[in-house]
Image (cartoon, rainbow, N blue to C red):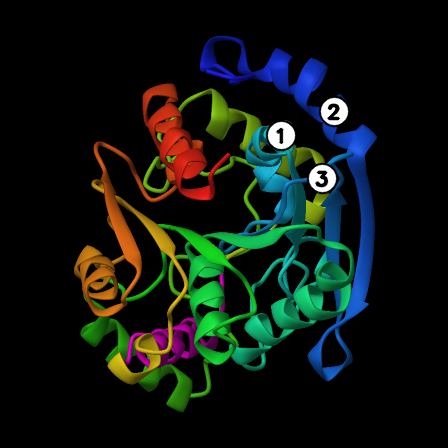
């Protein structure tokens, strides 16, 4: 595959090839998001771009977690932008300490993204604009395009956070805890950033990609995120109910490619099926043997997903 970074030589290729390429093409910036919150982003410029791609990360991530994907898209002729959602990465924290994830209003995420597209990217992007998002980022993208159906030309969603498994008992517990005054506390079982990384393998398979991400997180405080607050998850569930409403889904007309992981243990995959059936121009791909973090899976999963992505975007 074109410039593919294989697991067998992953760290060396990232350090010697990918990172130098990205650094030579990167400019960092920030803009004023809603409620006067500063939001950070990065631009990776191609000399003769055929399109612009905006990457929206997942929970407890940053745009810098997507260096490998940025590299592939850049090499394919795209100018690529990554945003750090408020409360993440270089956009600061909104929780009770330097690690907790929280947000005042879930709509703030999509409104910030709209500002980036309309005031920064729209003025300089040549060709079509595409959005690519993982988990939380994918839900933010859907929220955005339901409110602004023509703001972009197409979207790619990886493991979108549409509905949680066992959501009903979780919602009841969250409501009880918030009513008891614990909404600002960490979710039970979650806490500050752990320097042991994410060893349980529930989100991504153990391998060179996850090892590289864990090492980068340990080395940079900007990449160190803890768990979300109880109230954050409550707000997230309410937002997913809103964006999965049939009337809301009917507003989506742009082409959408949705990747759903076969070994998903967090998100109810039936919601992915419902989304694909309800929207008019969506294609659902079930990724065999993949976990929630599809983009950090093994080489076999990675290459198959990239091939489908390139075909969809015409790269």
Q: Residues within 10 Å of mark 1 (few under 14, many from 20)?
A: many
Q: Residue beneath label 2, please?
A: 21
Residue 125 picture location, percent across and down: 71, 53
The answer to whether residue 254 is magenta is no
Q: Is residue 213 left or right of residue 167?
A: right
Per the image, the residue denoted by label 1 is: 71
Query: Is 29 on the left-hand or right-hand side of 218?
Result: right
In this rendering, position of residue 203 left or right of residue 32: left
Asked whether the beta carbons under mark 2 and mark 1 sit within 8 Å of each other, the answer is: yes
In the displayed structure, 256 sits above or below 288; it is below
| Residue 44 image position (x, y, % from top left) | 73, 40
CA separation, marks 2 and 1?
8 Å
Relative image position of residue 81 (x, y in whole percent): 67, 49
**Considering depth in this image, is 305 or 281 the residue closer to the camera?**
281
Query: Which is more toward the observer, 306 or 292?
Result: 306
Is residue 192 placed above or below 19 in the rendered structure? below
In the rendered structure, which disc, 2 or 1, sits on the residue that comes first in sequence?
Answer: 2
Residue pushed farthest bottom? Answer: 179
- Secondary structure mostly seen in magenta is helix
Other-residue count near label 3 (Cα within 10 Å), few / some / many at <14 / 14–19 / ≥20: few
Q: Pointer 3: what residue? A: 220
**SS label for mark 3:** loop
**In the rendered structure, which disc, 3 or 1, sits on the residue that comes first in sequence?**
1
Q: Which residues are magenta?
A: 228-245
Q: How many marks are shown on the rendered structure?
A: 3
Quadrant assignment, res 250: bottom left
Q: Which quadrant holds residue 206?
A: top left
Label 2, secondary structure: give it. Answer: helix
């Amino acid at each position: 595959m074109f410039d593919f970074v294989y697991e067998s030589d992953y760290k060396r290729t990232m350090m010697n090839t990918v990172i130098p390429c990205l650094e030579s093409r990167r400019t960092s910036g920030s803009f004023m998001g809603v409620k006067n919150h500063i939001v950070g982003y990065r631009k990776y410029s191609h000399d003769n771009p055929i399109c612009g791609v905006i990457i929206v990360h997942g929970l407890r991530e940053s745009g810098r977690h997507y260096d490998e994907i940025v590299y592939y898209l850049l090499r394919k002729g795209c100018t690529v932008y990554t945003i750090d959602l408020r409360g993440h990465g270089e956009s600061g924290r909104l929780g009770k300490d330097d690690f907790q994830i929280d947000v005042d209003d879930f709509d703030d995420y999509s409104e910030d993204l709209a500002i980036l597209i309309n005031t920064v990217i729209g003025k300089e992007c040549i060709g079509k604009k595409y959005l690519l998002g993982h988990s939380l980022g994918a839900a933010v993208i859907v929220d955005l395009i339901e409110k602004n159906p023509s703001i972009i030309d197409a979207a790619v969603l990886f493991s979108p956070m549409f509905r949680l498994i066992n959501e009903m008992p979780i919602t009841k517990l969250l409501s009880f805890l918030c009513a008891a005054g614990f909404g600002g506390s960490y979710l039970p079982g979650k806490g500050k950033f752990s320097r042991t990384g994410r060893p349980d393998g529930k989100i991504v398979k153990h391998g060179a990609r996850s090892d590289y991400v864990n090492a980068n997180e340990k080395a940079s405080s900007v990449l160190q995120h803890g768990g979300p607050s109880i109230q954050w998850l409550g707000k997230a569930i309410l937002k997913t109910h809103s964006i999965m409403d049939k009337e809301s889904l009917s507003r989506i007309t742009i082409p959408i490619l949705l990747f759903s992981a076969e070994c998903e243990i967090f998100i109810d995959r039936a919601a992915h099926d419902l989304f694909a059936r309800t929207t008019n121009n969506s294609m659902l791909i079930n990724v065999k043997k993949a976990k929630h973090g599809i983009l950090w899976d093994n080489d076999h999963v990675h290459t198959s997903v990239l091939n489908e992505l390139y075909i969809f975007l015409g790269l």
